[in-house]
Amino acid sequence: MTPASPSFSTAPTASQGMKPSVFWRLADDIPKPMSTALMVLSIAVPFALWWIVASLDLVNDKFLPSPFQVAQALGRLWTDGFLLGDTAASIMRVTVGFLLAALVSIPIGIAMGAFASVRSLLEPIVGVVRYMPAPAFIPLLLIYLGLGEAPKIALIFMGTVFFNILMIMDAVKFVPKALLETTYTLGGQRRQALFQVITPYVVPNIIDTFRINIATSWNLVVVAELVAAENGLGKRIVLAQKFFNTDEIFACLIILGVIGFALDLSLRGLMKATCKWAMD
């Protein structure tokens, strides 16, 4: 009598044991209309709460201006010519500082991830310096570089370059060894493995790194403008604070948030356009 062969057809799988769900899909996309609706809600709900609290006078408008007052402040800043000039100044500082950080961090991060010798040489000093708060260098930057644009750009550079380097290094370290072994098996050399395998593979991770760390650049530019600047959104916030114009402070904060969101969408679009293979 032969033993019955085990049957796996009646065993419930993980997916069979789950109740069907659209909202709680695990590691899967949700329908586009639902995604759009949730994105709208994420903005609409806080705005509605803000409007309700302001309308009911639950908080003095000097501490929490209404959306209408903030809109008036935006119009006033635009009419006076401050909004465009301050926004342009802040964008210029972030763009230059972060681009310089990107140009330095990409080759160094890839080299540290690809070569253990470079990693051993540079990781200790990078690890030490990145724990030093960038704003703590402001007095030295003012002494060394003066009161112009240089110290502000240098602060943004210092505050982002080391984090970029380490995140790119980690991305390179996780490149599958099978890809490199296949490259060498097919006759590829070290240079080809570095520039034609490793570098393209980590491009999506580099873009994600920039998406994360560019927020730090905006934090730092506001800090720099709070200390020493003739213009910029940070400077405008300081001036508004002196005269207790909280509506202008809210207006500047909203502009910063909109710019950041636009940058995030732009980098997402860049990834979709250049790394379609990584979006699957």
Image (tube, helix red, strand yellow):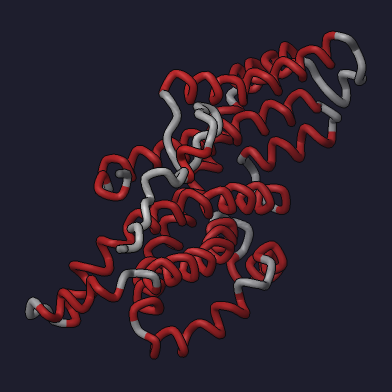
Q: Outermost residue toward the top?
A: 55
203 left or right, relative to 105: left
Residue under the point 39% across and 90% down: 117
Q: Return the residue nearer the eye: 220 or 21.
A: 21
Q: Quadrant of residue 245?
A: top right
246 left or right, relative to 36: right
Q: Return the residue nearer the eye: 32 or 66.
A: 32
Residue under the point 31% across and 41% down: 272
Residue under the point 65% across and 65% down: 134
116 left or right, relative to 37: left
**How many badges with numbers are in the image?**
0
Task: Tell me the quarter of the image containing the C terminus.
Answer: top left
- 56 to 187, vertically: above or below: above
Q: Outermost residue toward the left?
A: 187
In the image, residue 103 lies at what x, y percent? 37, 63
15 left or right, relative to 131: left
Q: Return the residue nearer the eye: 171 or 30.
A: 30
In the image, residue 132 lies at what x, y percent? 67, 72
Q: Return the residue nearer the eye: 195 or 221.
A: 195
Residue under the point 69% across and 36% down: 236
Task: Tell me the quarter of the image containing the N terminus.
Answer: bottom left
In the image, residue 62 lies at what x, y percent? 88, 22
- 72 to 177, vertically: above or below: above
In the image, residue 150 lies at what x, y percent? 54, 60
Q: Quadrant of residue 79?
A: top right
